[in-house]
């Protein structure tokens, strides 16, 4: 499988319930919503440990396997040496198609936070408020808490999960969505800019968080989240601004290459 790396996807900062299951980084486990998956990769050979129907119906779209990422890389301006290097370095990254509610909570938690603490916070709320499940291979795991479940949790109890000031954002957001004031179903049907505007009505969701949600849940590939890493790269390599027009329809992919390269190169 070309342009696909479990290790790079795991480290790319878009999902926080994926982890290596061996020291070699060959086998990974992943919890997405209420689903559990194990995947093994050796070179370009990947084995997905699930039923063929589940792979076709869910995981193929989840990992964006039908998109030609080599074609995206080929469209990079060859004179942009920084982006050429970044894409080569992170060429195995795919933009995951994750659950909208899970991404709203995840990126509220991510604010002013590091990856290790984000993972711990998410695991804590899943264990406390998510449904306990057992995979077909006997692995116990916890589904991501539903809107209804978190809408009934107090801000104080969420603070006990290590969320700090973000507890308020999640408590208020859960109640806002549970009441029907904001509809996730309608957001799914919105275009990029409309969805971003609607998401920013939620408590604690600023522009950067809304961009992350648009990219990693709604798969709006023109979303371009700007955090401190991206801002520093823009200041050095793109002083006149990122060439948005050239990369229309795949700006989010370029953002991930830049983010990963800046973080790990």
Image (spheres, rainbow, N blue to C red):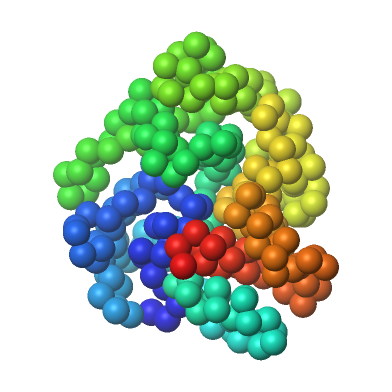
Seen in the picture, residue 141 relative to 176 is either above or below; the reply is below
Q: Can you see residue 186?
A: no
Figure label count: 0
Q: Is residue 2 left or right of residue 76?
A: left
Q: Is residue 139 left or right of residue 196?
A: left
The residue depicted at 50 percent of the width and 79 percent of the height is: 88
The residue depicted at 76 percent of the width and 32 percent of the height is: 201
Front-most of residues 191 and 14: 14
Front-most of residues 79 and 106: 79
Farthest residue, direction left: 138
Seen in the picture, residue 108 relative to 51 is either above or below; the reply is above
The residue depicted at 57 percent of the width and 36 percent of the height is: 112
Q: Is residue 76 left or right of residue 105?
A: right
Front-most of residues 225 and 194: 225
The residue depicted at 65 percent of the width and 62 percent of the height is: 233
The percent position of residue 40, horizontal first and vertical second, equals 26, 66
The percent position of residue 29, horizontal first and vertical second, equals 29, 53
The percent position of residue 240, horizontal first and vertical second, equals 82, 68
Q: Is residue 239 left or right of residue 174?
A: right
Q: Can you see residue 246?
A: yes
State the image quarter where residue 83 is shown: bottom right
In the picture, which quadrant includes the N terminus? bottom left
Front-most of residues 35 and 121: 121
State the image quarter where residue 223 is shown: bottom right
The percent position of residue 49, horizontal first and vertical second, equals 26, 61
């Amino acid at each position: 499988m070309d342009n696909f790396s479990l290790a790079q996807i795991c480290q790319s900062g878009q999902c926080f319930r994926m982890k290596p299951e061996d020291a070699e980084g060959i086998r990974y486990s992943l919890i997405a919503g209420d689903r559990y998956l194990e995947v093994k990769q050796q070179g370009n050979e990947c084995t997905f440990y699930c039923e063929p129907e589940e792979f076709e119906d869910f995981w193929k779209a989840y990992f964006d396997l039908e998109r030609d990422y080599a074609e995206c890389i080929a469209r990079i301006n060859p004179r942009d040496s920084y982006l050429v290097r970044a894409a080569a370095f992170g060429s195995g990254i795919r933009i995951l198609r994750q659950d909208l509610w899970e991404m709203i909570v995840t990126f509220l938690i991510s604010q002013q936070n590091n990856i290790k603490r984000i993972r711990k916070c998410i695991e804590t709320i899943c264990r406390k408020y998510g449904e306990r499940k057992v995979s077909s291979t006997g692995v116990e795991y916890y589904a991501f808490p539903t809107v209804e479940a978190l809408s009934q949790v107090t801000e104080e109890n969420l603070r006990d999960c290590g969320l700090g000031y973000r507890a308020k954002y999640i408590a208020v957001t859960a109640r806002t969505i549970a009441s029907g004031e904001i509809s996730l179903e309608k957001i799914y049907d919105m275009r990029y800019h409309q969805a971003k505007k609607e998401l920013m009505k939620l408590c604690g969701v600023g522009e950067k968080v809304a961009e992350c949600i648009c990219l990693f849940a709604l798969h709006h590939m023109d979303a371009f989240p700007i955090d401190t890493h991206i801002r520093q790269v823009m200041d050095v390599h793109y002083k006149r601004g990122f060439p948005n027009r050239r990369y229309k329809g795949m700006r989010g992919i370029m953002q991930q290459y830049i983010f990963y390269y800046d973080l790990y190169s």
